[in-house]
Image (spheres, helix red, strand yellow):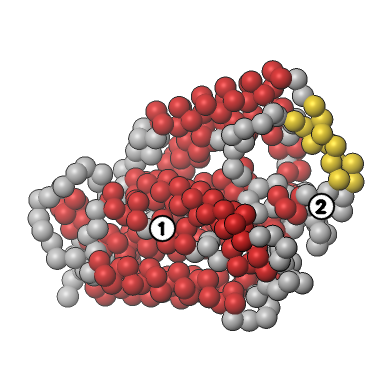
Amino acid sequence: MAPTDIFRQLQNYYAKEEEDIPAVSTTTAAVLSVFYTLLYVLPFYLSSATRPSPTLSRDAPSVIRARIRAVTASTILSTLATIFIITSYGHASPWETARLLGWYPVAPLDISKNFLLTAILFAGPLFERGVAESGWRSWIQGHALHETLSSWIGWRNYVAGPVTEEILFRSLFISLHLLAHVTSTRITFLTPLYFGIAHVHHFYEFKLTHPHTSVVPALLRSLLQFAYTTLFGWYATFVFLRTGSLLSVIIIHAFCNWCGLPRVWGRVEKDIAIGGPDVGSEEDDSIRGKDDREIKKKMLVADGRLGIGWTVGYYFVLVSGALGFWKGLWVLTESKGSLADFRPR
Protein backbone atom coordinates (compact mmCIF):
# COMPACT_ATOMS: atom_id res chain seq x y z
CA MET A 1 0.00 0.00 0.00
CA ALA A 2 1.39 3.40 -0.95
CA PRO A 3 2.17 5.63 2.02
CA THR A 4 -0.35 8.38 2.70
CA ASP A 5 0.72 11.94 3.51
CA ILE A 6 0.64 11.81 7.28
CA PHE A 7 1.09 15.56 7.54
CA ARG A 8 -1.94 16.18 5.32
CA GLN A 9 -3.94 13.98 7.69
CA LEU A 10 -2.70 15.91 10.71
CA GLN A 11 -3.34 19.27 9.07
CA ASN A 12 -6.85 18.23 8.09
CA TYR A 13 -7.50 17.04 11.61
CA TYR A 14 -6.31 20.21 13.32
CA ALA A 15 -8.11 22.35 10.72
CA LYS A 16 -11.25 20.26 11.38
CA GLU A 17 -11.66 19.54 7.70
CA GLU A 18 -11.74 15.76 8.01
CA GLU A 19 -12.11 13.29 10.83
CA ASP A 20 -9.34 10.84 10.02
CA ILE A 21 -8.99 7.70 12.07
CA PRO A 22 -5.92 8.05 14.30
CA ALA A 23 -3.00 5.73 13.59
CA VAL A 24 -2.84 4.75 17.28
CA SER A 25 -5.22 5.24 20.19
CA THR A 26 -4.60 7.75 22.96
CA THR A 27 -4.34 4.82 25.36
CA THR A 28 -1.60 3.26 23.25
CA ALA A 29 0.29 6.57 23.14
CA ALA A 30 0.02 6.92 26.93
CA VAL A 31 1.03 3.33 27.66
CA LEU A 32 4.04 3.57 25.36
CA SER A 33 5.06 6.85 27.02
CA VAL A 34 4.94 5.20 30.44
CA PHE A 35 6.87 2.19 29.15
CA TYR A 36 9.55 4.35 27.52
CA THR A 37 9.91 6.36 30.75
CA LEU A 38 10.40 3.19 32.80
CA LEU A 39 12.84 1.85 30.22
CA TYR A 40 14.82 5.07 30.60
CA VAL A 41 14.87 5.24 34.42
CA LEU A 42 14.73 1.66 35.77
CA PRO A 43 18.16 0.56 34.41
CA PHE A 44 19.69 3.06 36.87
CA TYR A 45 18.79 0.65 39.69
CA LEU A 46 19.32 -2.73 38.03
CA SER A 47 23.11 -2.69 38.10
CA SER A 48 25.63 -1.88 40.79
CA ALA A 49 27.47 0.22 38.20
CA THR A 50 24.52 2.63 37.83
CA ARG A 51 22.91 2.31 41.25
CA PRO A 52 24.00 4.92 43.83
CA SER A 53 24.60 4.00 47.46
CA PRO A 54 25.43 5.83 50.70
CA THR A 55 29.07 5.67 49.64
CA LEU A 56 28.62 6.12 45.88
CA SER A 57 27.08 9.33 44.55
CA ARG A 58 25.18 9.67 41.28
CA ASP A 59 27.84 12.26 40.43
CA ALA A 60 30.68 9.73 40.59
CA PRO A 61 32.32 9.51 37.14
CA SER A 62 31.89 5.72 37.02
CA VAL A 63 28.16 6.04 37.70
CA ILE A 64 27.75 8.82 35.14
CA ARG A 65 29.52 6.81 32.43
CA ALA A 66 27.43 3.71 33.12
CA ARG A 67 24.20 5.71 33.15
CA ILE A 68 25.04 7.43 29.87
CA ARG A 69 25.49 4.01 28.28
CA ALA A 70 22.18 2.84 29.75
CA VAL A 71 20.09 5.83 28.62
CA THR A 72 21.71 5.75 25.19
CA ALA A 73 20.68 2.12 24.74
CA SER A 74 17.12 2.69 26.01
CA THR A 75 16.72 5.78 23.82
CA ILE A 76 17.84 3.85 20.74
CA LEU A 77 15.40 1.01 21.48
CA SER A 78 12.52 3.43 22.06
CA THR A 79 13.36 5.31 18.86
CA LEU A 80 13.39 2.15 16.77
CA ALA A 81 10.05 1.07 18.22
CA THR A 82 8.52 4.49 17.48
CA ILE A 83 9.84 4.52 13.92
CA PHE A 84 8.23 1.12 13.39
CA ILE A 85 4.90 2.43 14.70
CA ILE A 86 5.02 5.60 12.57
CA THR A 87 5.88 3.75 9.36
CA SER A 88 3.66 0.70 9.93
CA TYR A 89 0.55 2.26 11.48
CA GLY A 90 0.91 5.83 10.25
CA HIS A 91 2.01 4.67 6.78
CA ALA A 92 4.60 7.45 6.72
CA SER A 93 7.51 7.66 4.32
CA PRO A 94 11.08 7.94 5.68
CA TRP A 95 11.04 11.70 5.01
CA GLU A 96 7.68 12.13 6.78
CA THR A 97 8.95 10.06 9.70
CA ALA A 98 12.03 12.25 10.03
CA ARG A 99 9.83 15.36 9.95
CA LEU A 100 7.43 14.03 12.56
CA LEU A 101 10.36 13.17 14.85
CA GLY A 102 11.82 16.63 14.38
CA TRP A 103 15.01 15.39 12.77
CA TYR A 104 14.55 17.18 9.45
CA PRO A 105 14.76 19.88 8.21
CA VAL A 106 17.41 21.39 10.48
CA ALA A 107 16.21 25.02 10.02
CA PRO A 108 19.09 27.13 11.42
CA LEU A 109 16.89 30.26 11.49
CA ASP A 110 14.34 28.57 13.76
CA ILE A 111 17.12 27.32 16.04
CA SER A 112 18.56 30.84 16.29
CA LYS A 113 15.17 32.40 17.06
CA ASN A 114 14.37 29.80 19.71
CA PHE A 115 17.74 30.24 21.37
CA LEU A 116 17.28 34.03 21.34
CA LEU A 117 13.88 33.64 22.99
CA THR A 118 15.36 31.46 25.72
CA ALA A 119 18.29 33.83 26.25
CA ILE A 120 15.79 36.69 26.70
CA LEU A 121 14.04 34.67 29.40
CA PHE A 122 17.37 34.11 31.17
CA ALA A 123 18.57 37.70 30.69
CA GLY A 124 18.82 38.12 34.46
CA PRO A 125 21.14 35.15 35.11
CA LEU A 126 23.21 36.08 32.04
CA PHE A 127 23.58 39.61 33.41
CA GLU A 128 24.59 38.31 36.84
CA ARG A 129 27.13 35.79 35.60
CA GLY A 130 28.36 37.59 32.51
CA VAL A 131 28.42 41.22 33.67
CA ALA A 132 28.27 41.38 37.48
CA GLU A 133 30.66 38.45 37.87
CA SER A 134 32.69 39.37 34.74
CA GLY A 135 32.15 35.93 33.24
CA TRP A 136 31.90 37.31 29.71
CA ARG A 137 35.68 37.23 29.35
CA SER A 138 35.76 33.49 29.98
CA TRP A 139 32.86 33.00 27.56
CA ILE A 140 34.64 34.83 24.74
CA GLN A 141 37.91 32.99 25.33
CA GLY A 142 36.13 29.64 25.37
CA HIS A 143 37.41 28.71 28.82
CA ALA A 144 33.89 28.22 30.19
CA LEU A 145 32.98 25.72 27.47
CA HIS A 146 36.23 23.82 27.94
CA GLU A 147 35.77 23.64 31.71
CA THR A 148 32.14 22.62 31.33
CA LEU A 149 32.90 19.65 29.09
CA SER A 150 36.07 18.63 30.93
CA SER A 151 34.12 16.81 33.64
CA TRP A 152 31.67 13.94 33.43
CA ILE A 153 29.10 16.02 35.32
CA GLY A 154 29.29 18.65 32.60
CA TRP A 155 29.09 16.04 29.85
CA ARG A 156 26.01 14.51 31.51
CA ASN A 157 24.22 17.79 32.16
CA TYR A 158 24.92 19.55 28.89
CA VAL A 159 25.29 16.80 26.29
CA ALA A 160 24.03 13.31 27.18
CA GLY A 161 21.07 14.45 29.30
CA PRO A 162 19.63 17.02 26.87
CA VAL A 163 20.12 14.81 23.81
CA THR A 164 18.57 11.61 25.19
CA GLU A 165 15.81 13.35 27.18
CA GLU A 166 14.69 15.53 24.28
CA ILE A 167 14.70 12.58 21.87
CA LEU A 168 12.57 10.59 24.31
CA PHE A 169 10.26 13.12 25.95
CA ARG A 170 9.79 15.44 22.98
CA SER A 171 10.56 13.68 19.70
CA LEU A 172 9.08 10.27 20.55
CA PHE A 173 6.29 11.18 22.97
CA ILE A 174 4.94 14.04 20.88
CA SER A 175 5.00 12.06 17.64
CA LEU A 176 3.03 9.24 19.29
CA HIS A 177 0.42 11.66 20.63
CA LEU A 178 0.16 13.39 17.26
CA LEU A 179 -0.52 10.01 15.68
CA ALA A 180 -3.27 9.55 18.29
CA HIS A 181 -4.79 12.93 17.25
CA VAL A 182 -4.36 14.42 20.69
CA THR A 183 -4.86 18.19 20.55
CA SER A 184 -1.77 20.37 20.60
CA THR A 185 -2.85 22.03 23.85
CA ARG A 186 -3.23 18.69 25.63
CA ILE A 187 0.11 17.51 24.25
CA THR A 188 1.77 20.69 25.54
CA PHE A 189 0.47 20.36 29.08
CA LEU A 190 0.19 16.58 29.55
CA THR A 191 3.27 14.98 27.96
CA PRO A 192 5.74 17.05 30.08
CA LEU A 193 4.30 15.34 33.17
CA TYR A 194 6.19 12.21 32.12
CA PHE A 195 9.34 14.33 32.00
CA GLY A 196 8.69 15.69 35.49
CA ILE A 197 7.85 12.28 36.94
CA ALA A 198 11.03 10.83 35.44
CA HIS A 199 13.01 13.10 37.80
CA VAL A 200 11.14 12.10 40.98
CA HIS A 201 13.57 9.24 41.56
CA HIS A 202 16.12 11.86 42.58
CA PHE A 203 14.29 11.99 45.94
CA TYR A 204 15.41 8.42 46.67
CA GLU A 205 18.96 9.13 45.52
CA PHE A 206 19.18 12.30 47.58
CA LYS A 207 17.99 10.53 50.74
CA LEU A 208 20.40 7.71 50.05
CA THR A 209 23.43 10.01 49.87
CA HIS A 210 22.13 12.46 52.51
CA PRO A 211 20.76 10.14 55.22
CA HIS A 212 20.80 12.83 57.90
CA THR A 213 18.48 15.12 55.96
CA SER A 214 14.89 14.85 57.16
CA VAL A 215 12.12 13.72 54.80
CA VAL A 216 10.33 17.07 54.58
CA PRO A 217 13.25 19.12 53.15
CA ALA A 218 14.15 16.26 50.79
CA LEU A 219 10.54 16.00 49.64
CA LEU A 220 10.28 19.76 49.10
CA ARG A 221 13.48 19.59 47.07
CA SER A 222 11.99 16.89 44.84
CA LEU A 223 8.70 18.77 44.46
CA LEU A 224 10.61 21.85 43.36
CA GLN A 225 12.55 19.77 40.86
CA PHE A 226 9.31 18.24 39.57
CA ALA A 227 7.81 21.72 39.23
CA TYR A 228 10.64 23.28 37.24
CA THR A 229 11.22 20.23 35.03
CA THR A 230 7.50 20.21 34.20
CA LEU A 231 7.54 23.95 33.49
CA PHE A 232 10.52 23.50 31.20
CA GLY A 233 8.73 20.57 29.58
CA TRP A 234 5.76 22.78 28.74
CA TYR A 235 8.04 25.29 27.08
CA ALA A 236 10.11 22.70 25.18
CA THR A 237 6.98 20.90 24.00
CA PHE A 238 5.47 24.17 22.78
CA VAL A 239 8.67 25.02 20.89
CA PHE A 240 8.88 21.53 19.37
CA LEU A 241 5.26 21.63 18.16
CA ARG A 242 5.66 25.15 16.81
CA THR A 243 8.95 24.53 14.98
CA GLY A 244 9.28 20.77 14.48
CA SER A 245 12.95 21.10 15.41
CA LEU A 246 14.51 18.54 17.74
CA LEU A 247 17.88 20.29 17.62
CA SER A 248 16.24 23.50 18.89
CA VAL A 249 14.92 21.90 22.06
CA ILE A 250 18.20 20.03 22.68
CA ILE A 251 20.12 23.32 22.56
CA ILE A 252 17.51 25.06 24.72
CA HIS A 253 17.67 22.21 27.25
CA ALA A 254 21.47 22.36 27.50
CA PHE A 255 21.37 26.15 27.83
CA CYS A 256 18.76 26.03 30.62
CA ASN A 257 20.78 23.39 32.47
CA TRP A 258 23.82 25.66 32.23
CA CYS A 259 21.92 28.71 33.47
CA GLY A 260 20.21 26.90 36.34
CA LEU A 261 17.27 28.42 38.20
CA PRO A 262 17.28 32.23 38.17
CA ARG A 263 17.82 34.08 41.44
CA VAL A 264 14.43 35.36 42.62
CA TRP A 265 15.52 36.81 45.95
CA GLY A 266 18.63 38.01 47.73
CA ARG A 267 21.47 40.31 46.81
CA VAL A 268 23.80 39.81 43.86
CA GLU A 269 27.27 38.91 45.11
CA LYS A 270 30.44 37.80 43.44
CA ASP A 271 32.02 34.50 44.51
CA ILE A 272 35.79 34.64 44.71
CA ALA A 273 37.44 31.22 44.67
CA ILE A 274 40.29 30.83 47.17
CA GLY A 275 40.82 27.10 46.82
CA GLY A 276 39.54 24.00 45.13
CA PRO A 277 40.46 20.95 43.06
CA ASP A 278 41.98 21.03 39.61
CA VAL A 279 39.69 21.37 36.62
CA GLY A 280 38.94 18.02 35.02
CA SER A 281 39.60 15.91 38.10
CA GLU A 282 37.02 13.56 39.51
CA GLU A 283 36.23 16.17 42.13
CA ASP A 284 35.95 19.01 39.59
CA ASP A 285 33.83 21.77 41.09
CA SER A 286 34.17 24.30 38.30
CA ILE A 287 30.82 23.52 36.70
CA ARG A 288 27.85 25.68 37.59
CA GLY A 289 24.38 24.63 36.58
CA LYS A 290 21.76 21.99 37.17
CA ASP A 291 22.64 19.46 39.89
CA ASP A 292 26.14 20.89 40.37
CA ARG A 293 25.48 23.33 43.18
CA GLU A 294 26.01 20.83 45.98
CA ILE A 295 29.37 19.81 44.54
CA LYS A 296 30.34 23.45 44.16
CA LYS A 297 29.76 23.93 47.89
CA LYS A 298 32.90 21.89 48.52
CA MET A 299 34.98 24.76 47.13
CA LEU A 300 36.22 27.46 49.46
CA VAL A 301 34.80 30.79 48.35
CA ALA A 302 34.80 34.28 49.74
CA ASP A 303 31.85 36.58 49.16
CA GLY A 304 32.71 39.62 47.04
CA ARG A 305 30.23 42.26 48.12
CA LEU A 306 28.93 44.25 45.15
CA GLY A 307 27.17 47.59 45.25
CA ILE A 308 23.39 47.60 45.61
CA GLY A 309 23.18 48.94 42.07
CA TRP A 310 24.14 45.51 40.72
CA THR A 311 21.22 43.91 42.56
CA VAL A 312 18.78 46.56 41.33
CA GLY A 313 20.10 46.13 37.81
CA TYR A 314 19.80 42.35 38.02
CA TYR A 315 16.14 42.37 39.04
CA PHE A 316 15.34 45.00 36.42
CA VAL A 317 16.93 42.84 33.71
CA LEU A 318 15.24 39.71 35.13
CA VAL A 319 11.76 41.24 34.94
CA SER A 320 12.45 42.84 31.56
CA GLY A 321 13.58 39.47 30.23
CA ALA A 322 10.42 37.77 31.46
CA LEU A 323 8.26 40.42 29.78
CA GLY A 324 10.29 40.21 26.59
CA PHE A 325 9.94 36.44 26.60
CA TRP A 326 6.17 36.68 26.92
CA LYS A 327 5.91 39.21 24.08
CA GLY A 328 8.19 37.20 21.79
CA LEU A 329 6.86 33.73 22.58
CA TRP A 330 4.60 33.38 19.54
CA VAL A 331 6.64 35.54 17.16
CA LEU A 332 10.00 33.84 17.73
CA THR A 333 8.53 30.31 17.58
CA GLU A 334 6.65 30.84 14.33
CA SER A 335 7.92 28.39 11.73
CA LYS A 336 6.99 26.72 8.45
CA GLY A 337 8.02 23.41 10.03
CA SER A 338 5.31 23.43 12.72
CA LEU A 339 3.85 20.03 13.53
CA ALA A 340 0.46 21.13 14.90
CA ASP A 341 -1.94 24.02 14.94
CA PHE A 342 -2.86 25.62 18.26
CA ARG A 343 -6.22 26.86 17.02
CA PRO A 344 -9.14 25.46 19.04
CA ARG A 345 -11.10 22.65 17.41
Q: Secondary structure at mark 1?
A: helix
The secondary element bearing badge 2 is classed as loop
Mark 2 surroundings within 10 Å by alpha-carbon count, few (fewer than 14), some (14 through 19), many (20 or more): some
Q: Out of 295 and 142, give the one closest to the viewer.
A: 295
Q: Which residue is mark 1?
A: 193
Residue 156 in view: no
Q: Residue 306 appears at what percent x and percent y?
A: 77, 24
Find disc 2 in the rendering and name its residue.
298
Q: Position of residue 285 (x, y in %)?
A: 78, 52
For the view shown, which residue lies furthest in the left direction?
18
Quadrant location of residue 301?
top right
The foreground one among 283 and 172 is: 283
Residue 85, by quadrant, is bottom left
Query: Disc 2 marks which amino acid?
Result: Lys
Tell me if mark 1 has few (under 14), some (14-19) or many (20+) residues whose alpha carbon lies within 10 angstroms of its own. Answer: some
Q: Residue 158: x and y, percent? A: 62, 54
